[in-house]
Amino acid sequence: MSKIELYKDFKPVSRFKKYNLIVYCLAVILIWLSFGWIGIVIESSLVNIIMVGLLVFCLCFVGVWNILYYKSVVYNLNSTEMTWKRGVWFRQTGIVPYNRITNVDIVQGPLMRLFNISSLSIQTAGYSAQKMAEINIIGIEEPEPLRGMIMDFVRAGGVLPAATGGAGDGEAQPLCGSEVIDELREIKSILKKIAEK
């Protein structure tokens, strides 16, 4: 995999197309097999021809969809956020600021190991209570350097502070670390005075 560069779009590795095709073809075959008993029960050659024709159509459909889906998947990293887009019929796009990222996991199932690809599962503060990730970067050949790059940006940017200080011009500015501590000390002293009364 070529080195991922900031401000340049990147895609999953080309092996991801084969992996994705196998996964979806297996799903189609399993669904088809769950209805395959219809041809056996009815014992009609017409029904069997229709069932086989349906299977062939669905597999061809998945093959074409897989090519279009691969072309649609694009990721981009810059110094403050990552963007992604994907989808054939229903296009999805998203922006994930680094300062909202809470967790980056590498996911690799048995079939992914066979193709030597992984996915990065990225959770943000808004999605931390949910089991699903906000974004999955799929089909990555070497996930560790990409995860390291993302985590470096996360660590460099810090988290968004909950408290803001007055800027004087009507715009709220984030408090720096020492200002937050001073604010907390002031709140503590006010709470102490209230408790003493």
Image (spheres, rainbow, N blue to C red):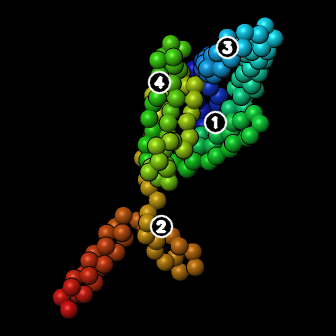
Query: What residue did someone put label 3 on?
Result: 41
Query: Who's the residue at 63% across and 43% down the image?
Result: 83
Amino acid residing under circle 4: Gln
Q: Disc 1 and disc 4: Cα gap in Å?
A: 19 Å
Query: What residue did someone put label 2 on?
Result: 174
Q: Is residue 127 visible?
A: yes
Amino acid residing under circle 1: Tyr
> Toward which corner of the image does residue 14 lie, by quadrant?
top right
Mark 1 residue crowding within 10 angstroms, few (<14) / some (14–19) / many (20+): many
Mark 4 touches mark 2? (CB < 8 Å): no
Mark 3 residue crowding within 10 angstroms, few (<14) / some (14–19) / many (20+): few
Query: What residue did someone put label 4 on?
Result: 108
* Number of the front mark, 4 or 3: 3
Counting residues from the start of the chain, the first of labels 1 and 2 encountered is 1
Mark 1 touches mark 4? (CB < 8 Å): no
**Residue at the outermost front position:** 42
Residue 2, relative to residue 5: is it above or below? above
Q: Disc 1 and disc 2: Cα gap in Å?
A: 29 Å
Amino acid residing under circle 3: Val
Counting residues from the start of the chain, the first of labels 1 and 4 encountered is 1
Given residues 103 and 133, the one toward you in this image is 133
Query: Who's the residue at 74% across and 20% down the image?
Result: 58
Residue 113, relative to residue 187: is it above or below? above
